[in-house]
Image (cartoon, rainbow, N blue to C red):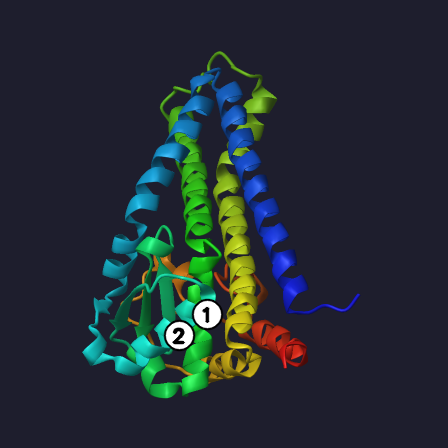
Amino acid sequence: MVTNLYTHQSENVRKTFLLMGGFLVFVITLGWVFSQALSNPAILYIAVVIAIVMNLVSYWSSDKVAIALSGARWVARQEAVELYRAVENLSITAGLQLPKIHIIPSPQINALATGRDAKHAAVAVTTGALEKLSGVELEGVLAHELSHIGNKDMLVSTVVVVLAGVVALLSDFFLRSLWWGGGGRDNNRGGGAFVIFALAAAILAPIAATLIRLAVSREREFLADASGVMLTRYPEGLAGALEKIAKDKSPMSQARSGLAHLYFTNPYKNSGKLITKLFMTHPPLEERIRRLRATDNMVQ
């Protein structure tokens, strides 16, 4: 079977929803294990409530928080005419409302998109991207970020990040309960073997949740690359931007680890070591470039 831009997009959508479904099952299962080990069914209900509340809060305020933490500032049209023009043209092509446009004062080539939906979206581009990228390369990066908005990645990212946080909270609660005697260690609730199993789950679950969260993030990046090229019809523009980023050594001092998954590329410049790849928020640049070049002929 010949793979192209569209098959990659469909494949990534399926993978992402499978991962999200698996994540939800993972959280529920973990809550059930802890509730059984502590003989307290309320733990499972609490986990579900916390997940819903945290999702709602982060969903409504995600754009403001992300922009503030990134150090970005809103710019008027007269300050960045070319940037506005590029975003406007791509937004029209994508059928999206013009997002709020911001600039991040950083020499690193990067960008981010945030917002709970297309009507409340924001795009931020670093000064490094504006200075170092050509017109078609910058257009490729902007198309990628607008694709995140069009693909509703902000909602997906919020859900997955919150679920990972719930896993961490559940694990911490369980470990504290055991430590302070609330876990019924003396009366061996749930059976000694079951409690040991739950203890192991409490230690390993946050790591597993982080890996799942990052896997979802990486799949969304591949999807945004594919969707972005569908807007520009020029894969080489995005591939060229990624090549420049691979060579760019400029730091981003104001980057926050909690926002790393929102950026166009990881602001922390991950190494190629296996253990590092497992905890990457983005796919390797080489793999993204390879996929773009493989689909180049499909959109000519």
Corner quadrant of residue 91: bottom left
Which structural element holds mark 1? helix
Q: Nearer the viewer, residue 133 or 165?
A: 133
Residue 11 at x, y percent in the picture: 65, 57
Q: Amino acid at mark 1?
A: Thr
Would you say residue 285 is visible in this rendering?
Answer: yes
Identify the mark at residue 89; answer none if there is no mark: 2
Residue at the image point whose x is 54% and y is 45% from the top: 208
Q: CA distance from mark 2 to mark 1?
A: 6 Å
Disc 2 crowd rating (10 Å Cα; few below 14, some 14-19, many 20+) is some
Q: Amino acid at mark 2?
A: Asn
Which image quarter is the C terminus in?
A: bottom right
In the rendered structure, the answer to whether residue 197 lies left or right of residue 144 reads right
Residue 160 at x, y percent in the picture: 46, 46
Q: Is residue 263 above or below residue 199?
A: below
Residue at the image point whose x is 55% and y is 44% from the top: 20
Residue at the image point whose x is 36% and y is 24% from the top: 180
Which structural element holds mark 2? helix
Q: Is the residue under label 1 in contact with that under label 2 (CB below 8 Å)?
A: yes
Would you say residue 266 is visible in this rendering?
Answer: no
Q: Which residue is mark 1?
A: 93
Disc 1 crowd rating (10 Å Cα; few below 14, some 14-19, many 20+) is few
Residue 235 at x, y percent in the picture: 56, 79
Q: Is residue 236 above or below residue 213?
A: below
Q: Nearer the viewer, residue 71 or 196?
A: 71
Name the outermost residue toward the top: 187
Name the outermost residue toward the right: 1
Corner quadrant of residue 236: bottom right
